[in-house]
Amino acid sequence: MISIRDLHKYFGALHVLKGIDLDVQKGEVLSVIGASGSGKSTLLYCINGLEAIQDGAVTVDGTDVHAKGTDINKLRQKLGMVFQQWNSFPHLTALENVALAPRIVKGKSKAEAREIAAKQLQHVGLGEKLDVYPGALSGGQQQRLAIARALAMEPEYMLFDEATSALDPELVGEVLDTMRLLADEGMTMICVTHEMGFARDVSDRVAFFHQGVMEEIGPPAQIFGDARSEHTRKFLANVR
Amino acid sequence: MEPTLKFFSGFAPNDLWFMGEAALRTLWISVLSISLGTVLGTLFGWMLYEGRRAATLTLAPVLDVFRSVPLIIQLVLFYNFAPIVGLNLDPFASGTVILTVYTAALVANVARGGIEAVGAPMRRAARSLGLSYWQDLRHVVLPIGGRAVFPSWVGVALGVMKDSALVSVLGYVELLKASQILITRTQEPFLILALAGAFYFALSYPVSRYATHLENRWAQ
């Protein structure tokens, strides 16, 4: 379980997250929606310790992410993350991209790491592209490569930071399909997204962020059909 | 009749051998200085990138001095003043020290540029996979940044190889010094300088060809 208590985050004088309380259970798919700058991406960075926090606490399966003694590199193996920019390693083939972390972080043998990588690439539909360099892949393929790369560490949670925002419209579908597949397999996911269709159809709960505050959280039917907050209704009216 | 005393003698095949040996000395002092300087310069570049203010205030000005003062002045100053502080270095050692520091000063900026070329998002992605700071540096930043600045580094290396000619002022018999010796004896400057040039070319050209070959392979 990911558990966030009274989380405050500042960038200099800018108060980006203003006291977030949130629990995400194993197996749950949570979508986080809201305008740009509402703090939703920062929330993900705080969950896996890529950003320091100023107050409050984030715990993952009982381990305090931001505590001094925490082995953050070990903890991050539980928390796969996919970014808006796919950040493929350009000097490695698709297979090597995925095999890198299992090999050097988990100490798997080269053959073992390649086997894991091939399996994960099959999983995201890139079984034909094992020996291709990222430069020869489309944006959608590179994003699926990034998903496979995260999955190769066998994470228990997946964090998606606007995974489809940088893609050409015709490539969004294949990445969303891959995310759906993961959700169907029971992966615990937190998806920061602008894809309202995905949020409605796939999530167990949807959280709406507004200016650093979690305005509202609830099942998709409630958020999309019967939002309590004025801000939520206004936001949803504008994105549709 | 008394035989006339001969001060000068023409260029002999043996002299080619003499120049070849000198070319090897040029190669040796260059390879040594460039290797050491690259390691040191990469370390400096990393310090400039990570150290922020501390490195900007201390290391950067020192490197600026070594980059800006003509190499020949550095060589002469170091060679003549090192003994005052008790360092009795022969011309080869003095030349190597100065060429190494000079290379390091040039490589530091190249290396910093390489780290910057990788960019924060790429490194965050690597760290999110569980890579430690050093694993990220070794397996992501070094290969990606290294390739980005490889052409600049080759430029520095070839430049230092040619600049190693200046070590001749200390009396180290590398290619240029050997040429000067031969010119004095044969009085055939045109031939010998052309030959020396050909030797330098023969040292540089394979390096730059191989570099182009690597760049093409990486560009696929």
Image: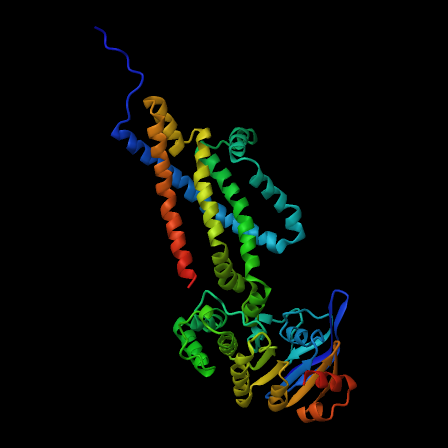
> Quick check: can you spot residue B36?
no
In this rendering, the answer to whether B191 lies above or below A86 is above
Depth check, front residue: B126 or A57: B126
Please tell me which residue is depicted at 64% across the width and 85% down the height of the picture.
A196
Q: Position of residue B208 (x, y in %)?
A: 40, 49
Please tell me which residue is depicted at 40% across the width and 72% down the height of the picture.
A131
Q: Quadrant of residue A193?
A: bottom right
In this rendering, the answer to whether A94 lies above or below B181 is below
Most distant residue in the top direction:
B1
Please tell me which residue is depicted at 59% across the width and 88% down the height of the picture.
A27
Q: Quadrant of the C terminus of chain B?
A: bottom left
Q: Quadrant of residue A132?
A: bottom left
Depth check, front residue: B15 or A54: B15
What coloring was used for the rendering? Answer: rainbow
Q: Quadrant of residue A46?
A: bottom right
In this rendering, the answer to whether A223 lies above or below A70 is below
Most distant residue in the left direction:
B1
Q: Quadrant of the N terminus of chain B?
A: top left
Depth check, front residue: B146 or A66: B146
Depth check, front residue: A34 or A76: A34
Q: Position of residue A171 (x, y in %)?
A: 52, 79
Left or right of A103, for residue A57: right
